[in-house]
Amino acid sequence: MSAATPTPVQLNPLGGESYRLTLPNTANAPKLARDFLTSLLRVSRHPGLVDDARLCVTELVTNAHCHTRTPLIRVHVAVNRKRVTVAVTDDGGPVGTALGTTLRPVPAATPEQEHGRGLALVESLALAWGTGSGGERHPGRTVVWFTLGRPEATA
């Protein structure tokens, strides 16, 4: 089960490697982010996470592309031997509704609805996910993140 939290977790709390990709806000951004993440997970020995990671990053980058006027979309990936955490950041500039206010899972969408199931999908696949802001240093910036991997053993 995953939990949405209001602030992002530290991206790489258990050590490992970090990677960043900055994309122009174009229709190609989701595909580029998918391909980037796929390559990272395959070389970091996480091939079992590839499908879920591709779905989740596609949803977050697509939301940034469709719901903001941000010129750049940033993807930060932290990988260690147990988990991968992906954060997608935009600079805001809403089209219609601010991205930060649209990033909430909606109740089960009906099959007839064209939109509204993406973040519920992220929530169902991720160990954890959440949203945050750029804080005082980057006002207006929205960060949405998810973590995939093996759940921690409970005592």
Image (spheres, rainbow, N blue to C red):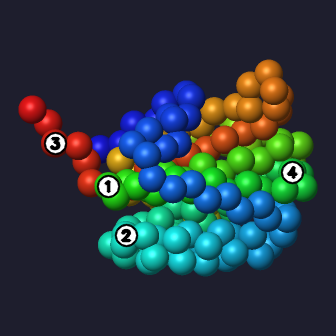
Between residues 103 and 130, which one lies in front from this camera angle? 130
Between residues 74 and 79, which one lies in front from this camera angle? 79
Looking at the rendered image, the disc whose residue lies closer to the viewer, 1 or 3, is 1
Q: Which residue is mark 4?
A: 70
For the residues labelled 2 and 4, the Cα–Cα distance comes to 31 Å
Q: Which residue is mark 1?
A: 82
Confirm or deny contact between disc 2 and disc 3 (CB under 8 A): no
Q: Is residue 64 above or below residue 141?
A: below
Between residues 78 and 129, which one lies in front from this camera angle? 78
Q: Which residue is mark 2?
A: 46
- The kind of secondary structure element at disc 1 is loop
**Which of the marked residues, 1 or 4, is nearer the chain's N terminus?**
4
Looking at the rendered image, the disc whose residue lies closer to the viewer, 1 or 4, is 1
**Which of the marked residues, 3 or 4, is nearer the chain's N terminus?**
4
Q: Is residue 36 above or below residue 70?
A: below
Residue at 32% over, 55% down: 82
**Which of the marked residues, 1 or 2, is nearer the chain's N terminus?**
2
Three-letter amino acid code at the position of disc 2: His
**Which of the marked residues, 2 or 3, is nearer the chain's N terminus?**
2
- The kind of secondary structure element at disc 2 is loop
Task: Specify the quadrant of the image occupied by residue 27.
Answer: bottom right
